[in-house]
Image (cartoon, rainbow, N blue to C red):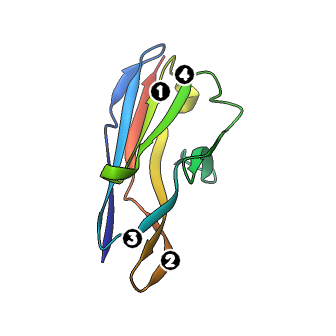
Amino acid sequence: QVHVVESGGDLVQAGGSLRLSCVASGSISLIYSMGWYRQAPGQAREMVAVSTNGVSTNYADSVKGRFTISRDNAKNTVNLQMNSLKPEDTAVYYCRMFITTPVGSSDYWGQGTQVTVSS
């Protein structure tokens, strides 16, 4: 069984920074992609940043230049460094990993961590 857990969400003032972390545990053979998504109240969940196989990285246009995704394959972790935060960054942030286990591959989501940016 695999578990994905996020941490690091908090209340921060506009212009501030936060660092989110996500770790996967369990019978993991390989993690192909690691990414961060967010969902604001009344809005659809959207991609924030994704690292695929440690080779390619994609960012939402709204966070380019402010957010940085990094992964540590040895520790099954992915981080999201968020700088110059804006009130519109307020959302629940979810970690998503595509994980291969001895019985197959699947998407795994964390429970989410709240980020609130005050103006």
Q: Which mark is residue 107?
A: none
Label 3 secondary element: loop
Q: Is there any visible trace of residue 74 in the rendered image?
A: yes
Q: Is residue 7 left or right of residue 29?
A: left
| Residue at the image position 39 percent from the left and 52 percent from the top | 112
Q: Nearer the viewer, mark 1 or mark 3?
A: 3
CA gap, disc 2 and disc 4: 36 Å
* Residue at the outermost right position: 61
**Residue wearing tag 2:** 105
**Residue wearing tag 3:** 29
User: Within the image, what quadrant is residue 12 found in?
Assistant: top left
Q: Of the residues shown, which amino acid type is indicated by label 4?
A: Lys
Mark 4 vs mark 3: which is more N-terminal? Answer: 3
Mark 2 vs mark 4: which is more N-terminal? Answer: 4
Label 2 secondary element: strand
| Residue at the image position 38 percent from the left and 42 percent from the top | 114
CA gap, disc 2 and disc 3: 9 Å
Label 4 secondary element: loop
Q: Is there any visible trace of residue 90 in the rendered image?
A: no
Q: Of the residues shown, which amino acid type is indicated by label 1?
A: Met
Q: Nearer the viewer, mark 4 or mark 3?
A: 3
CA gap, disc 4 and disc 3: 37 Å
Q: Is residue 8 left or right of residue 43?
A: left
